[in-house]
């Protein structure tokens, strides 16, 4: 796209969206805009993703890739059975992924339910804050009646505000897939704007907002693309594939299609939006394919924690095993990494 | 005193019009017994050129008709031929020296051949096309399409003077091609009379262009013409057909070689030999 | 924001990931393969080299007319005494066996092909060699089902087929030729291109492992003059050629007046038409694979990009950005997207035409990449501001050079696409089904890819209109091209099907 719309950082999302849409935000104007976006050819998209997946990453590149993956992980626990103890354990792992190797980088964040935020913040102590503390780690909280999103707007906003108040640096919200699939784009838009506002802290700064599309329920790549644009228009800092509670969760083609939107948004506005594939990425080999896809779609500058994350739990240990293999020259075993 | 009959002027048929040769030439056509039958136009290379132009224009329109429609037009030719058989019987008897019964049988066969090919218009594609099961998420279909402009050298000589021409022209136009046909030099009258039927049969002008005259003189121009897509040398046995085929290689025309027979037996391959197979791929996905 | 890893930003500089050459052990010399054995040729042996480095790979025997005689005689003998008498089911099993052996030795063949041709291992490993196996597998199944091939109850092979193949897909073209010929009951004398004979002679080894009866397939490396001797040989019944339109013309002339059958797969100047409603990301990928697959050395390449005027600038910008991610270099590196040009002479052809493009006023842009200093290389290149009258819009460049033209309406796109003596391939990119189908109908091209490009399958007929050749390879027409219904075969020459 040749014409650039200048970013006006001070603009509220609604004003900026109106600028992009060329008129006030409404179901009709959003529909006209989103449905005017070029379609996705599923076969072409999947073929491109498969081709990116054949990149062969060896030796020094692989070592860098593995460390990069760790630094981009949102180490996650989202179980009904979570307890403060479990979260403390998760934080310990996040801070010291490989007890045997002090050069091992830390993950970007821990991701927990809202009621666990305080425990996570507490466990992190001085290491809380990716941007503020040296070697620090963020706390991300899922909110807005995660994972279904089926609650009233006020409940969702309260859910968000409480997590932010408890110290969450990042909020992972879910969009209203029901509203989206029935074409009530305005409603989805308004809700994201409202949640973003609920991310506002007393000092005027905002917790980072990741918008979960739940691509497994959107069903088509065209929907994923439209939902991505919609979320970005409404002010999301990140677009995220999935809750991890619906299959299929993150896939390489879905992530590629979202990266393409982010790339196009950057061309249009000069603003960089983050992408977070979540759920289902369990091996280093898979994760490296995502890195390649990011590098060759948006460029390597996206391989930073404020622009790309892996939502994952078991991925970390596989990366650690591979890392040990690279440094020792022989294959490692699960007993040489900690379970959490 | 008996009435003096009115003789017909036999003309060329180009672009749906009956025209004299631009060269002004005619040649004498005789009966089998050597009597004067008529003066036929002796087409020149420029007439052949004009015919190719007419055919090129016509093929787009003809090929764009529905196969059902083309079939009806071909069937209409059969109807009209049936109704005007007496004229053809007379010309065949005169030109070939055969019995009235034999001439009638030839007209019967010609009518039936038009009917047979008429029925192929909306079927050849189903028989010659294929659905291709490729190993991937693609719709994939191959369909035959008309090759375009076909130059035909109809069987020469006196035998099968109507049927020979029909057996090469009818299959060529089934798919939507337009033809420029050189009629039998020695017995051209049934071919020229057939043009009167074609002209009144709803066949768009230019789909069939009939040239009478010297095949040896015109054929080299047609096989070398860059706007001709295929040449049917069925009637070229006595010509230097190897030379004609070599000349056709200049623009890689499709070539149907001579068979040494006075007519081309009815066959699906007569149709498909003058078609191109187009294969279409399209991505196929639910999401 | 601090990165805990030192250099994520140079992640794209993938470390070298070379495919192991250890799997391939080349002999110092390869003979001709005649009557089941490697034999010396009567011509002067020649070296085959790696175009990416100039490295000497092996010495190849060269045949001459005398060797052609020997090979045709062996093929005739095999046809008469063995192959035409063998039940189709038995022929089928030989072909299945060959398909399996190709699969078993696929990596070795891929490495050899990348070395000898210069194309990336990614393509030989994931496309060329798997397609070879697929071709044998598909046609194997036809061998005992010929009565269902649409030619009547009792079709049979033609006899001895002389086959001449090009250097752009050496082993794949060999499979496209040999598999249907053998399935239909013919025997074969085949000549690989003089710059890429290696895999054909490795394939001879597979034929020996398959225990294929002697003389059924004979493989002759050597100069172009040997091809003429094959075409003109009086005991040859069928000629199949893939290569340039110029040579195709000569072959059509050479067999005129004979009863030989002919199929020709020749040049092209494929139009790739991008409408304003195209699925744009897929279209960009399709444009890239359309012209940079195999370094653009593809007869059906989408070498003319026809873009709707309203999206021209956007498409060109996206395309350029995409091209900056292409990795040009060592064909044996698994991450290489674009390999070497096959020969010095082909590189000169490409360079000359690209120079002509600049001289005629088109604007040249090449992807910023460092080309190796040895071997034959040409950077992926786009010409914008191209007119239909420019040489680069009319002549086949056969290299990684794309000419971009514009159109305003579907009718103009169709007219421009068809405005060429060629008619091999075309592409259409649009989300509107009714328009895709209507445009497909009016394109004069033998293969039309809609929202995809450069796809091939043994079940899918391939071949051109007009001066791109005649006859089809692949699918049902592919087997019909090697069959006859009897001696009084009415319709012949140009077309494969006979009844």
Image (spheres, grey):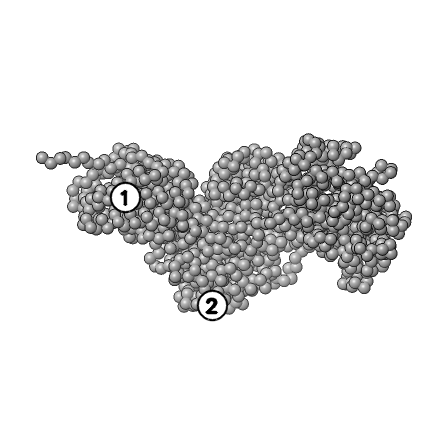
Q: Name the spot of residue C352 as percent of width and height, x first.
A: 55, 41
Residue shown at 78%/63% (left/top)?
A: A333
| CB atoms of marks 1 and 2 within 8 Å | no
Answer left or right for B195 relative to C20.
left
**Depicted B68 relative to depicted C88: above or below:** above
Kindly identify which residue carries mark 2.
C90
Q: Which residue is more in the foreground, A301 or C329?
A: A301
Q: Name the spot of residue C380 as percent of width and height, x first.
A: 61, 43
Q: Looking at the rendered structure, which numbered label has been put on residue B81?
A: 1
Q: Which residue is more in the foreground, C459 or C44?
A: C459
Chain holding disc 2:
C
Residue shown at 64%/54% (left/top)?
A: C332
Q: Name the spot of residue B194 as percent of width and height, x first.
A: 28, 41
Answer left or right for C428 relative to B253.
right
Residue shown at 43%/60% (left/top)?
A: C148
Q: Which residue is more in the foreground, C463 or B197?
A: B197
């Amino acid at each position: 796209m040749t014409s650039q719309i200048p970013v006006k950082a001070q603009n509220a999302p609604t004003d900026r969206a109106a600028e992009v849409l060329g008129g006030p935000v409404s179901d009709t104007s959003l529909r006209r805009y989103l449905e005017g976006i070029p379609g996705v050819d599923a076969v072409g998209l999947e073929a491109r993703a498969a081709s990116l997946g054949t990149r062969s990453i060896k030796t020094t590149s692989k070592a860098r890739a593995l460390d990069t993956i760790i630094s981009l992980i949102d180490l996650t626990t989202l179980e009904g059975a979570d307890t403060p103890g479990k979260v403390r354990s998760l934080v310990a792992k996040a801070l010291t992924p490989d007890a045997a190797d002090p050069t091992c980088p830390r993950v970007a964040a821990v991701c927990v339910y809202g009621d666990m935020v305080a425990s996570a913040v507490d466990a992190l102590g001085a290491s809380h804050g990716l941007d503020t503390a040296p070697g620090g780690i963020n706390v991300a909280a899922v909110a807005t009646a995660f994972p279904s999103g089926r609650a009233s707007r006020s409940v969702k906003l309260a859910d968000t505000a409480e997590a932010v108040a408890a110290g969450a640096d990042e909020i992972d919200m879910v969009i209203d897939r029901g509203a989206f699939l029935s074409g009530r784009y305005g409603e989805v838009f308004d809700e994201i704007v409202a949640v973003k506002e609920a991310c506002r802290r007393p000092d005027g700064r905002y917790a980072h907002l990741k918008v979960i599309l739940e691509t497994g329920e959107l069903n088509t790549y065209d929907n994923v693309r439209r939902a991505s644009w919609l979320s970005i228009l409404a002010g999301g800092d990140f677009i995220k594939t999935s809750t991890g509670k619906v299959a299929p969760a993150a896939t390489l083609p879905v992530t590629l299609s979202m990266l393409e939107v982010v790339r196009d948004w950057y061309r249009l506005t000069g603003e960089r939006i983050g992408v977070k594939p979540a759920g289902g990425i369990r091996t280093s080999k898979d994760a490296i394919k995502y890195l390649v896809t990011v590098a060759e779609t948006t460029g390597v500058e996206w391989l930073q924690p404020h622009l790309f994350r892996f939502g994952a739990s078991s991925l970390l240990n596989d990366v650690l095993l591979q890392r040990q293999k690279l440094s020792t020259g022989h294959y490692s075993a699960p007993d040489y990494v900690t379970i959490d | 005193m008996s009435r003096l009959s009115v003789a017909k002027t036999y003309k060329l048929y180009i672009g749906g019009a009956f025209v004299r040769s631009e060269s002004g030439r005619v040649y004498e056509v005789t009966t089998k017994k050597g009597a004067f039958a008529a003066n036929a136009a002796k087409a020149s290379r420029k007439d052949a050129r004009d015919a190719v132009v007419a055919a090129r224009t016509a093929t787009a329109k003809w090929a764009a008709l529905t196969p059902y429609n083309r079939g009806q037009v071909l069937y209409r030719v059969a109807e009209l031929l049936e109704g005007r058989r007496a004229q053809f019987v007379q010309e065949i008897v005169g030109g070939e020296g055969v019995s009235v019964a034999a001439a009638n049988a030839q007209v019967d066969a010609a009518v039936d051949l038009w009917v047979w090919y008429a029925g192929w218009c909306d079927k050849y594609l189903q028989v010659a096309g294929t659905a291709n099961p490729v190993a991937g998420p693609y719709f994939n279909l191959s369909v035959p399409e008309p090759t375009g402009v076909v130059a035909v050298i109809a069987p020469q000589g006196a035998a099968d003077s109507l049927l020979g021409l029909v057996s090469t022209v009818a299959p060529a136009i089934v798919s939507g091609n337009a033809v420029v046909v050189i009629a039998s030099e020695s017995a051209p009258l049934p071919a020229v009379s057939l043009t009167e039927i074609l002209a009144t049969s709803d066949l768009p002008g230019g789909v069939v262009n009939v040239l009478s005259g010297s095949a040896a003189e015109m054929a080299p121009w047609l096989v070398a013409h860059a706007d001709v897509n295929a040449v049917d040398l069925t009637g070229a046995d006595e010509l230097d057909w190897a030379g004609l085929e070599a000349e056709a290689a200049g623009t890689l025309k499709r070539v149907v070689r001579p068979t040494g027979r006075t007519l081309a037996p009815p066959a699906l391959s007569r149709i498909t030999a003058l078609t191109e197979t187009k294969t279409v791929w399209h991505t196929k996905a639910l999401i | 924001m601090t990165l805990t890893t030192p250099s994520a930003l140079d992640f794209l500089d993938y470390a070298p990931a070379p495919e192991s050459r250890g799997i391939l052990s080349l002999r110092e010399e390869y003979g001709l393969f005649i009557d089941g054995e490697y034999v010396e040729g009567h011509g002067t042996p020649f070296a085959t080299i790696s175009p990416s480095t100039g490295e000497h790979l092996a010495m190849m025997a060269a045949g001459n007319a005398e060797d052609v005689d020997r090979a045709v005689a062996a093929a005739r003998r095999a046809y008469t005494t063995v192959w035409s008498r063998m039940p189709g089911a038995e022929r089928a099993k030989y072909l299945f066996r060959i398909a399996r052996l190709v699969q078993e030795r696929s990596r070795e063949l891929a490495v050899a092909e990348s070395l000898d041709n210069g194309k990336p291992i990614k393509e030989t490993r994931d496309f060329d060699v798997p397609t070879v196996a697929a071709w044998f597998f598909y046609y194997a199944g036809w061998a005992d089902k010929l009565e269902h091939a649409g030619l009547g109850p009792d079709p049979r092979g033609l006899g001895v087929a002389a086959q001449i193949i090009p250097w752009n897909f050496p082993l794949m073209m060999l499979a496209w030729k040999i598999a249907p010929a053998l399935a239909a009951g013919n025997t074969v004398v085949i000549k690989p291109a003089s710059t890429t004979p290696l895999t054909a002679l490795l394939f001879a080894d597979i034929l020996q492992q398959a225990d294929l009866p002697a003389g059924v397939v004979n493989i002759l490396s050597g100069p172009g003059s040997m091809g003429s001797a094959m075409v003109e040989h009086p005991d040859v019944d069928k000629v199949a050629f893939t290569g340039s339109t110029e040579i195709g013309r000569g072959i059509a002339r050479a067999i005129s007046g004979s009863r030989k059958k002919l199929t020709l797969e020749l040049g092209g100047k494929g139009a790739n038409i991008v409408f304003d409603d195209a699925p744009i990301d897929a279209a960009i990928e399709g444009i890239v694979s359309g012209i940079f697959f195999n370094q653009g050395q593809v007869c059906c390449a989408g070498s003319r990009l026809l873009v709707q005027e309203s999206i021209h600038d956007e498409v060109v910008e996206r395309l350029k950005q995409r091209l900056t991610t292409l990795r040009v270099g060592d064909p044996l590196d698994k991450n290489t997207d674009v390999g070497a040009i096959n020969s010095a002479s082909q590189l000169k052809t490409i360079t000359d035409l690209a120079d002509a493009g600049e001289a005629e006023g088109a604007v040249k842009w090449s992807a910023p990449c460092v080309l190796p200093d040895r071997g034959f290389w040409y950077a992926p290149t786009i010409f914008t501001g191209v007119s239909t009258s420019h040489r680069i819009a009319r002549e086949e460049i056969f290299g990684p050079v794309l000419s971009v033209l514009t159109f305003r309406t579907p009718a103009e796109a169709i007219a421009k696409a068809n405005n060429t003596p060629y008619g091999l391939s075309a592409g259409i990119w649009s989300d509107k089904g009714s328009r895709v189908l209507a445009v497909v109908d009016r394109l004069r091209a033998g293969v039309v890819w809609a929202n995809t490009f450069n796809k091939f399958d043994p079940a899918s007929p391939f071949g051109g209109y007009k001066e791109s050749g005649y006859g089809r390879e692949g699918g049902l027409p592919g087997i019909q091209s090697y069959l006859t219904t009897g001696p009084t075969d009415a319709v012949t020459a140009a077309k494969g099907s006979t009844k």
